[in-house]
Amino acid sequence: QDHEVSVFTFDTSLNGPLRVFPQRTDEDATDPAASPDESPAIDWVASLEPRGAETRLGEALSETIRQSAGRTLSGIVVVTDGGQNAGIDPISAHDRAVAAKARLLAVGVGGVEQPINVQIADVQSPTDVQLGDSFDLVAYVQAQGLAGRNVTVDLLAAKDGEADAPAVVSTQNVTLPEDGLASELKFSLKPQGEGGWKYTVKVTPTVPVAEFNAQDNEQTLSIRVFDRPTRVLLLAGGPMRDYQFVRNLLYRHKSMEVDVLLQTAVVGSSQESQNLLFHFPTTREELYEYDVVIAFDPDWRLIPAENIKNLSDWVFQEGGGLILIAGDVNTVQLAGAAEQATPMQEQLAPLKELYPVVLNSYLTEMRFERSSTQPFPIEFTPDGQRAEFLQLTDDPVTSLARWKEFTGFYRCYPTSGAKAGATVLARFSDSRSQNEFGLP
């Protein structure tokens, strides 16, 4: 009666207000019919339906306080079971409320008994398997309120691109331990064909029960079966950290064969690779043996024009994969050389066409004096959110949540926009790096 009350809900984000109840005036107090409330009634059943995979209590509180900035906020009443599985700590939101001189009042809800539920807590397996090799897929079953009960665990398999329904390839029965403990089940498998496969682990109680959440009774993961390893050429202008991380990662991956061309290396150097090269492949035959070239800020001026032309033909005509990583040393020189009418510009012209963005040669936009101690989250475009190769899990919702665990990038090379036909998958979210072409 004495305050304006706004009603919100929250899950992954703050939603609302669903309705705003205005503060009563003296006229309302003496004559309730003077200003009847014509706002539509709230459908509480629909509004309180659980949504999404996250409960961000701390962020919801912080966002409520932020939206009320500049107005008088008497307090926030939170109706919650106290659960949170993502986002900032509610204590941080509490400190912000104290600073805003707003009271936080918690109303606890929920039963004292744990709901009955059984779930596939986790599934582990290699992501890439050599055709003909055996491998183990390990599943963990966890339950609440079903200790001593029996469940059936099925493993189903389906080949990517086929219309047939997944087929059961193995079944195990297990007696559930006490609440909260996980049972480990191991399935030994041997793939029958190369390509992508989807394996689904599904748990079903032997005696049907009313579960709290039947959607967590199964998990699906993807496994790639390969007949030959992917051949990768790592080209680096120097031993930058990004290069070292990717080199070690790929060299230890059984589905990869990695050759290294480190332009600062000398004879006698050692790098984790199948072969350490001291010059770029000189013939088409040598270059075309690779599936992917990953270039970490290389000095392209050290590569003869004929070899750059071979690289361009390999990409445009043969569908070779080229990944380009910019840097502070050589990318700046490449951008400047590409804009000058010199023999070097003619040599680098085919290379310039391979870049999906227009490189910016203005050193002032690099902002070398700016500290790079703060990471900025990656900002996916709609195309990036739909890109399957960027999915960290087999479920788009949980994949996006996994990406949110990545703190972000510290710096990004400035560009003058994407070229026509290029698909932008993500942007650097530091607003200070924005120019007339938008975020890089």
Image (tube, rainbow, N blue to C red):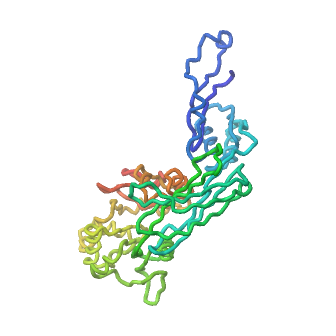
Q: Position of residue 408 (x, y in %)?
A: 52, 58
Q: Residue furthest bottom?
A: 268
Compared to 291, does 73 lie above or below? Answer: above
Q: Quadrant of residue 6?
A: top right
Foreground residue among 38 and 179: 179
| Image quadrant in which the C terminus is located | bottom left
Foreground residue among 79 and 118: 118
- Residue 169 horizontal side relative to residue 110, left or right: left
Q: Is residue 235 visible?
A: no
| Image quadrant in which the N terminus is located | top right
Foreground residue among 322 and 332: 322
Compared to 188, does 51 lie above or below? Answer: above
- Residue 352 horizontal side relative to residue 6, left or right: left
Q: Position of residue 224 (x, y in %)?
A: 45, 66
- Residue 283 horizontal side relative to residue 363, left or right: left
Compared to 403, does 231 lie above or below? Answer: below
Give the mark count: 0
Foreground residue among 95 and 377: 377
Residue drawn at (50%, 56%) of the image: 394
Q: Residue furthest right?
A: 112
Q: Position of residue 231 (x, y in %)?
A: 39, 75
Q: Is residue 273 visible?
A: yes
Residue drawn at (53%, 71%) of the image: 135
Q: Quadrant of residue 58?
A: top right
Q: Position of residue 298 (x, y in %)?
A: 38, 74
